[in-house]
Image (cartoon, rainbow, N blue to C red):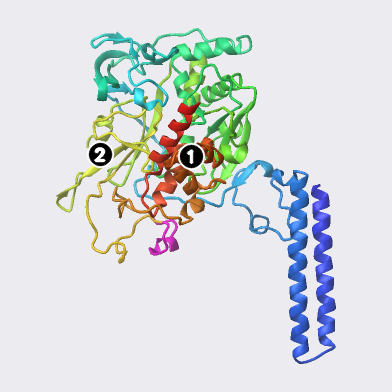
Amino acid sequence: MKSNNIIIKTSLLFSLLFFAEVVNAQAGMTGGMSNWILIGLGILVLLILLFVGDSLLKLEAKSIGADEAGENYSILPNTGELFGSGVSVNAPAQKVHVLKQGHDINLEGKATDSTVHNVQARTFSIKPTDFIGLQPIPKVTVAVGETVKAGDVIFYDKKLPDIKFCSPVSGEVLEVKRGAKRSIAEIIILADIEQSYREYEPLNLNQASRDELKTFLAESGVWPMIKQRPYQILADLEATPRDIFISTFDTAPLAPDSNVIVKGREEAFQAGLDVLGKLTDGKVYLGIDAASNPSGAFTNALNVDKHYFKGKHPAGNVGVQIHHIKPINAGDVVWTLGVQEVISIGSLFTAGKFDAERVIVLAGAELEEPKYIRTKIGASIGNFLAENIVEVEDGEALSLRVLSGDVLTGSDIGSNGHLGFFDDQITVLQEGAYNEMFGWLLPLAPRPSVSRTFPGFLMPSLEYRADTNTHGEKRAFVVTGQYEKVLPMDIYVQHLMKSILVNDYERMEGLGLYELAEEDVAICEFVCTSKQPLQSILREGLDMMREQG
């Protein structure tokens, strides 16, 4: 088909050139106004031939499925063929996805030094609220004052007793915090200076059955690291996923570099991929950054199907990658993981222990030194931020917000809170509790925005010192078309959100609810003129649909 495509393109182009010569010769034989009429008619015929020929080529390619290979079936070359695609890795054309929609939010406070610092955290916690799908009051298996090893079970869901949630460190159970209606908010553990681990005898991957493997992962505490879509919930132990997807890069603002994370852990990462391959009848897909120089741990990974993505945020979101590789349909179940979760699963087999180690990034313009830190799941961040926060500026005390996660999806944990189970980033930024006089009319201060009212679009590499001010209040939910410009998915987000608000289950399903998680619409929430809480609305719709079964 490829050679036929080239022949067709060449033939049509020669035909057009010949026709142009005929028109030009005919025009030369006449004079005055008739010349221009003939030239105009010739140009019009040429354009019609180009359009019709181009459409026929594309229809033919689509009818036989050839366009899915990523080749340009058009008479005219695309910009990638003329100037190069900007892809920095050597990858098959059909495995490269160049995403046109998206928006990068360039903020000050990036960690530019890849050195990973070892800073000791005093306490660690596990929060049942980090796992969607659990009961609000799980069964706690430890008491305050009791000592535990890293990997010891500390709680489980009464409806899912086979899935155990384990301590990331050894130490003393310091507190069991309760929230509303006696729910368990978090279990806090005071870490030992010298860590001790619960040891495991790893299974033989070549001999163990899939059920034996699942039981081992559930008992050892790594199963909660696997998320399931639709609904972005804890993976079902009884399910067999259609496929498993792993994104090896993050395009969110100030996100950590996965090359730093995986450095020195390549063996465990590959071991994790091998384990995951035993859990599905389909494939393990790896989403790789095509615009940078990804680690060999990703590009040389074995037993996976590698796909390369180039584009602005949210190109690094696993949901966007699923959409472009193999979308989720009704009845499908897929599992997703991050790089560090894969490493933890692999370490269970290479080291025989529950490995909760995490490399996280401290980021934000309000930090003296943004940097990488090696710690464990659920670490208290007080020591990380000590003497590293800019608390006073121009003689005035700053009011700051500390997030576990990025500025689009992170949660406020305060300066002494604990890292979220799935988070690998701590972001510090100023509170935005102020009003701007005629701010909507006089855009005086530079700020990250997709609006061309601000001249920042002329300087795409300009970094901003952002705060939490939303520059407006919630207002009428009007159609703007903004979401489609920043979300590289074939989904009408605004129509979906409105169908959720009116509880229209059929439209929710038809408009692509199953493909989305909160992180996917976070960029839409950022650009939303109506200031709608899209992530909260989406979670409401996902929960409603899940309850309906």
Quadrant of the rendered image containing residue 380: top left
Q: Mark 1: which amino acid?
A: Asp
**Count of marks overlaid on the render:** 2
Q: CA distance from mark 1 to mark 2?
A: 49 Å
Q: Nearer the viewer, residue 112 or 447?
A: 447
Quadrant of the rendered image containing residue 292: top right
Q: Which mark is residue 504?
A: 1
**Above or below: residue 10 compared with residue 326:** below
Residue 143 in the figure: left or right of residue 216? left
Q: Which mark is residue 311?
A: none
- For image coordinates 73% across by 63% down, the residue present is 51
Which numbered disc flags the more N-terminal residue, 1 or 2? 2
- Expressed as whole percent of the image width and height from the top left, the position of residue 443 reads 32, 64
Q: Mark 2: which amino acid?
A: Asn
- For image coordinates 83% across by 66% down, the residue present is 14
Q: Nearer the viewer, residue 39 or 292?
A: 39
Q: Nearer the viewer, residue 497 or 408?
A: 497
Q: SS of the residue at dot 1?
A: loop
Disc 2 target residue: 388
- Expressed as whole percent of the image width and height from the top left, the position of residue 131 reads 40, 25
Residue 53 in the figure: left or right of residue 386? right
Q: SS of the residue at dot 2?
A: loop
Residue 544 in the figure: left or right of residue 45? left
The segment highlighted magenta reads: 450-462
